[in-house]
Image (cartoon, rainbow, N blue to C red):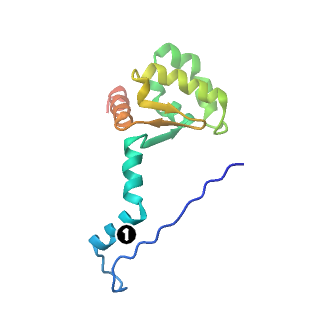
Amino acid sequence: RATAVHYVRCIKPNTKNVPAVFDMSHSAHQLRCAGVLEAVRISRMAYPNRMPHAAFLSRYILLTTPAWREAHSAAVGAARGAAAADEAVKAMCAEALAQIVTEHERYQLGRTKVFFKAFLLENLEQRRAAALGV
């Protein structure tokens, strides 16, 4: 079973060690030195948004064709309870993405999640809101 190491970075809010005093420049300097700001910048350049396959399917199924929705609605419902790395859910997600997103270089299908380039998820949310009439 794979594990991922997570580090907690403690940021001191001021140099005087007094409560309720927040020095923005001091905190920003600590974030820069720890590499946090650079990591955020790199993440935004690549695939800043991610979503599990089943969550993507249940949220954006209404952007697929009516025929596809009808043929896969039961399977999408069952996908909510499936394991994260379920190959059938991943395959359905790939089919749905091929219909929904015309620029295939704007997303990457991972083992358990869909990774979106910047602004693609916002575009999908706008299309979803329009489809719902919100």
- Mark 1 Cα-neighbour bin, 10 Å: few <14, some 14–19, many ≥20: some
Query: How far across and down, in percent of the image, does residue 87 sit?
Result: 66, 29
Q: How many marks?
A: 1
* Frontmost residue, 6 versus 83: 6
Camera-nearest residue between 45 and 123? 45
Q: Residue at x 32, y 68 (%)?
A: 29
Q: Answer with the quarter of the image where residue 84 lies.
A: top right
Q: Is residue 95 above or below residue 7?
A: above
Side of 1 relative to 111 (left or right): right
Residue 34 in picture, x, y percent from top left: 42, 65
Which element is circle 1 on? Answer: helix
Left-right relation of 22 to 87: left
Residue that lies at the very extreme toward the top in this rendered image: 67
Task: Quarter of the image for the C terminus: give it.
Answer: top left
Q: Is residue 40 above or below residue 55?
A: below
Question: Is 18 left, or right, of 62 in this rendering?
Answer: left
Q: Amino acid at mark 1?
A: Gln
- Residue pictured at 39% horizontal, 47% vertical: 42
* Residue displayed at 56% across by 60% down: 6
Residue 46, picture quadrant: top left
Q: Position of residue 18 (x, y in %)?
A: 35, 86
Q: Nearer the viewer, residue 131 or 3?
A: 3
Among the 4 quarters of the image, the one containing residue 79 = top right
- Farthest-out residue, front: 33
Residue 122 vertical placement versus 37 (above, below): above
Residue named by callout 1: 30
Q: 126 or 105, which is in the foreground?
A: 105
Expressed as whole percent of the image width and height from the top left, the position of residue 57 reads 52, 30
